[in-house]
Image (tube, rainbow, N blue to C red):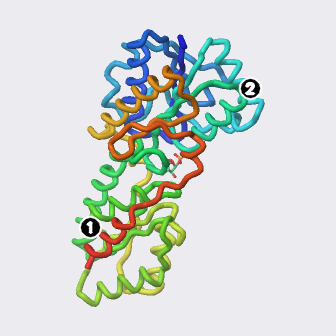
Amino acid sequence: MKRIGVFTSGGDAPGMNAAVRAVVRTALYHGIEVYGIMRGYSGMIKGEIVKLDSTSVANIVQRGGTILKSARSQRFQTKEGRQEAFDQLVNHRIEGLVAIGGNGTFTGAELFEREFGIPTVGAPGTIDNDLYGTDYTIGYDTAVNTALDAIDKIRDTADSHDRAFFVEVMGRDSGYIAIPCAIGGGAEIVLVPEQVQSIDTVIETLQVARKRQKSSFLIIVAEGDEEGNATAVATKVKEAIPEMDARVTVIGHIQRGGAPSAADRLLASQIGIAAVEGLLNGMRNVMAGIVDRKLVYTPFQECISRKKMINQGFMRMVEILSV
Ligand code: F6P
């Protein structure tokens, strides 16, 4: 393999730049040419492909976002789109790919390899931490710290006004961001998609706490929760406890930006190197991840089809610590 491509795709995540830098420098270290594909699969289809050298990735290890930009491509979901992408890679004589992204990115890469035989190794880049095959994804640690910082501020005003705040965090269908925010932010309740908790239970928990003279409350709601988003949950609770002064805060895309944490920079650098070296060692259709502090390569098929379970012990911690 003499020439590889690298791209970022799906929702951006802090640390993607550190991963791109690691991929580029590892390729150069091994005497391989490396091309940056702009805007994920969308740029691959359009041939937005630029040669990268060591200085192209200078001073980016500390920057949020992604210098390669990111997108979610509808066209790549069609056979014609994938054929166009393949033609572009052939034109640029790109023989292997490093895909930095999440579930959707690897679903596309797996199909692409089956149809056109382009070897791809993935690097898990998403704030959601919802990928099987790695304990942590690039961007997750930063996103949790960003959300927690916001939650601490909300706690101040909740306490001053004796209010309940329903705080919505990201995570798509996963509660991975919500759980550490609830533990670290001292929340009374956490609602996550992986574990159904009825509104009646939420109401009862709040009423019991109110009887104990608790006057301010934090309820962390993962955006994908079964009972609905934070606004929907707050509305139902207010119907049952009208005397409770409640507010809703949706933390939103702030969670996707900002300088990556030390943990994310380290993870991104480690995985970026592993992705390129995996590719050069003949690996294909796998994601590089860290499980129990060890580097592992997991087939895309498993990463996208298997559900990463939440830690039930953490859910119990929220219950115990909110007494
Ligand atoms: O996958 C990352 C993520 O931020 C999810 O947590 C969220 O559901 C989604 O992307 C938001 O997507 P968009 O940026 O397209 O609104």
Residue 24 horizontal side relative to residue 303, left or right: left
- How crowded is the residue under tag 2: few (<14 C-alpha within 10 Å), some, or many (20+)? some
Q: Secondary structure at mark 2?
A: helix
Residue flagged by tag 2: what amino acid is it?
Gln
Give the left or right position of residue 283, taking residue 153 as reference. right
Q: Residue at x 30, y 69 (%)?
A: 317
Q: Which mark is residue 83?
A: 2
Residue at 43% across, 23% down: 23
Residues 290 and 24: in front is 290
How far from the left and from the top, in percent, is residue 84? 72, 24
Crowding at dot 1, Cα within 10 Å, few <14 / some 14-19 / many 20+, comes out as: some
State the residue in front, 98 or 150.
98
Q: Position of residue 56 (x, y in %)?
A: 40, 16
**Type of amino acid at the residue the image marks with label 1:** Gly
Residue at the image point whose x is 57% and y is 18% from the top: 49
In the rendered view, would you say 45 is above or below 27? below
Disc 2 or disc 1, which is closer to the eye?
Answer: 2
Residue denoted by label 1 = 186
